[in-house]
């Protein structure tokens, strides 16, 4: 008699539909407001680096944020694996410096550069480690601080949020024209 074994491992990337990553990012921004997400990430980061305090947010909110960011990171990683130019470069004539955020002019024109640079420097596993560590250290008082440099992954995440939002907005504008 054969034993049927169920595979409980995640099957990310298998059987994906066309533009699945973009749909996942769009869902992320439907459930999470960009400024609120960046503010919560900033709050988690600041409380994680403080020794004698913990975050005032409800732990369930922090856990939901942790899971949402993990799926966002994976969607960004699968987005660059396709290596396609999804959008036409945008002219920068009428863009204010405030509209750029942390993105450079080249990154504003091609937001995929942000993801390529981030995943060239850090792996998905390292981003998971960063997010998990920041959540862990923000929820309690600990004598130890994170042992790695946590500023660079934080900056990459902020830039990835800006770039993903820009990609989604451009996708909506393109769909709206047709």
Image (cartoon, rainbow, N blue to C red):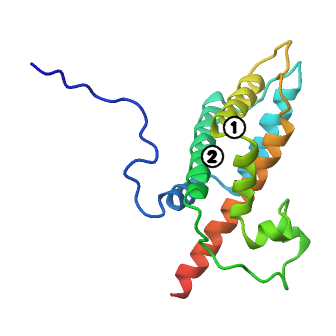
What's the distance in space between the residues labelled 2 and 1, CA to CA? 8 Å
The answer to whether one can see residue 38 in this image is: no
Image quadrant occupied by the N terminus: top left
Quarter-of-image position of residue 65: top right
Q: How many marks?
A: 2
The residue that appears at 67% across and 31% down in the rendered structure is 58
What number is the disc on residue 57? none
Q: Which residue is mark 2?
A: 73
Residue 135 location (% of width, % of height): 71, 29
Residue 151 location (% of width, % of height): 86, 38
Quarter-of-image position of residue 121: top right
**110 shown above or below 117:** below
Residue 59 location (% of width, % of height): 65, 28
Quarter-of-image position of residue 29: bottom right
Q: Is residue 97 left or right of residue 8?
A: right
* Badge 2 or badge 1: first in the primary sequence: 2
The residue that appears at 28% across and 28% down in the rendered structure is 6
Q: How many C-alpha atoms fall within 10 Å of the one at disc 1: few (<14), some, or many (≥20)?
A: many
Mark 2 lies on a secondary structure that is: helix
Mark 1 lies on a secondary structure that is: helix
Q: Which residue is mark 1?
A: 127
**106 shown above or below 177:** above
**151 shown above or below 49:** below
The residue that appears at 86% across and 32% down in the rendered structure is 149
The residue that appears at 55% across and 52% down in the rendered structure is 78
Q: Is residue 145 left or right of residue 157?
A: right
Taking depth in this image into account, of 50 and 61 the one nearest to the observer is: 50
Q: Is residue 95 left or right of residue 71?
A: right
Residue extending farthest top: 143
Contact check, label 2 and label 1, Cβ < 8 Å: yes
């Amino acid at each position: 008699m054969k034993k049927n074994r169920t595979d409980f491992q995640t099957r990310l990337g298998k059987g994906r539909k066309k533009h699945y990553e973009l749909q996942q990012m769009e869902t992320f921004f439907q459930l999470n407001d960009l400024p609120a997400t960046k503010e919560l990430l900033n709050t988690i980061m600041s409380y994680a680096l403080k020794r004698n305090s913990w975050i005032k947010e409800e732990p369930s909110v922090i856990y939901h944020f942790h899971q949402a960011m993990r799926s966002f990171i994976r969607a960004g990683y699968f987005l660059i694996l396709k290596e396609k130019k999804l959008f036409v470069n945008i002219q920068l004539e009428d863009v204010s410096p405030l509209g750029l955020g942390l993105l450079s002019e080249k990154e504003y024109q091609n937001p995929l550069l942000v993801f390529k640079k981030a995943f060239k420097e850090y792996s998905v596993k390292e981003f998971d480690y960063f997010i998990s560590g920041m959540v862990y250290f923000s929820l309690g008082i600990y004598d130890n601080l994170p042992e790695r440099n946590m500023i660079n992954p934080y900056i990459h995440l902020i830039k990835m949020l800006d770039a993903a939002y820009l990609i989604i907005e451009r996708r909506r504008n393109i769909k709206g024209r047709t």
